[in-house]
Image (cartoon, coloured by chain):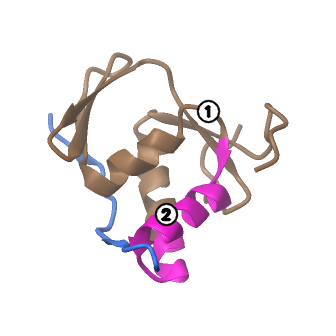
Amino acid sequence: QNQVKKAWQQPALEVLN
Amino acid sequence: MINTETITLSDYIVSCEQNIVSDMGDEKVMLSIRNGNYYNLGTTGGRIWDFLGEEISVKKIVEQLLSEYDVEQKECEHHVISFLEHMRKEGLVLVTQENKNNILT
């Protein structure tokens, strides 16, 4: 079986403070 | 070491040591001891961070992500490089053009 791939979310670096 | 040049697939990345990282649900949060800033790396960013404990090529990071996520290669490359450049700007990673560990990656 093909591996079920996860949905892609663009990586982003969020500066919290 | 590269400071301002655009990161390429052939560059090598490694995380800086002066960071405290913690899992928060599916995401990763980080405190930089160096600059005192808190960061949220998110889900995908946290996965990328997992690779950076040892020096690794950008190409290898993209290859690994392509095997795990449903994304086109060009889109993945663009997003990863953009993310890594932001990380470098914040002083969270080091970028080199050579693999100092001589690992075949």
- Quadrant for residue B7, please give it: bottom right
- In reply to whether residue B63 is colored magenta, the answer given is yes
What mark, if any, has residue B45 been given in the picture? none
Q: Residue at x 44, y 73 (%)?
A: A3
> Residue B41, percent across and down?
28, 46
- Quadrant for residue A4, please give it: bottom left
Which residue is the site of mark 1?
Answer: B54
The amino acid marked with disc number 1 is: Glu
Chain B as rendered: colour: brown
How much space separates mark 1 and mark 2, taking CA atoms?
Answer: 17 Å
Chain A as rendered: colour: blue
- In reply to whether residue B58 is colored magenta, the answer given is yes
The amino acid marked with disc number 2 is: Leu
For the record, the magenta segment spans B56-78
- Within 10 Å of disc 1 (Cα), the crowding (few <14, some 14-19, many 20+) is few
> Residue B49, percent across and down?
43, 42
In screen coordinates, is A12 left or right of B6?
left
Q: Residue at x 47, y 72 (%)?
A: B76
> Residue B6, percent across and down?
61, 59
- The disc numbered 2 marks a residue on which chain? B
